[in-house]
Amino acid sequence: MRVPAPAPARRRRLTPSERPALLVRGTVRSGRQIRHNGDVIVLGDVNPGGQVVAAGDVVVMGTLRGMVHAGATGEHTAVVAAFRLAPTQLRIANYLARPPEEPGGHPEYPELALVRDGVVVVRPLGPSVLPDLGPAPLRSNRR
């Protein structure tokens, strides 16, 4: 008698508060690739030729000049934030953005890239943008 193999378990998509975060201390140099099944926080720069691929959000506490892919598993609500956003390529889920062709100065404030109406848009990162991201659960042990 043959017993059929069990059906493969379906993975449920993790909510932002459930995704594990990876903290990368230092610069992601050319040729280095960071891949993580959650959010990635880089305490440094991402140089040209460096890559960061995350299932969730990507935050660069420095200059992003390399390639970044947030929401790599199809999470179109993922975001990319950096003190200075100047990537060679920026992807969120299956949406692709490239920097403007014309040379220009970079703003003196952090920026946030996100998908709105099927297009990757870049906004100044400040208090006025945060409500657009939706509610974030806060955890506290205080009563």
Image (tube, rainbow, N blue to C red):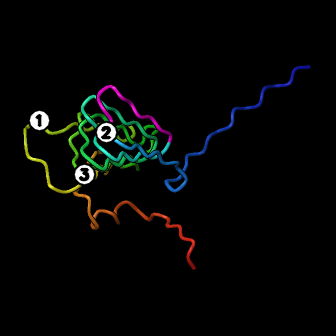
Report the residue at 53% width, 53% height from top. 15
Q: Which residue is mark 1?
A: 101
Of callouts 1 and 2, the N-terminal one: 2
Q: Please tell me in which quadrant of the rendered image residue 27 appears.
A: top left
Of callouts 3 and 1, the N-terminal one: 3
Asked if 72 appears above or below 113 in the picture, the reply is: above
The reply to whether discs 1 and 2 touch (Cβ–Cβ < 8 Å) is no
Q: Which residue is mark 2?
A: 27
Q: Which amino acid lies under the numbered mark 3 shown in the image of this protein?
A: Phe
- Where residue 72 sits in the image (x, y, percent)? 43, 37
What's drawn in magenta, residue-wise?
27-37
Nearest to viewer (mark 1 / mark 2): 2
Asked if 117 appears above or below 96 in the picture, the reply is: below
Q: Of residues 134 and 82, which is closer to you in this image?
A: 82
Could you tell me how many numbered marks the image carries?
3
Report the residue at 44% width, 65% height from top. 135
Q: Please tell me in which quadrant of the rendered image residue 97 appears.
A: top left
Q: Image quadrant for the N terminus?
A: top right
Which labelled disc corresponds to residue 83?
3
- Where residue 88 sits in the image (x, y, percent)? 23, 33
Q: How far separated are the C-alphas under marks 1 and 2?
A: 26 Å
Question: Which element carries disc 2, helix, strand or loop?
Answer: loop
Q: Magenta segment, principal secondary structure? A: loop
Q: Of residues 38 and 25, which is closer to you in this image?
A: 25
Asked if 29 appears above or below 12 in the picture, the reply is: above
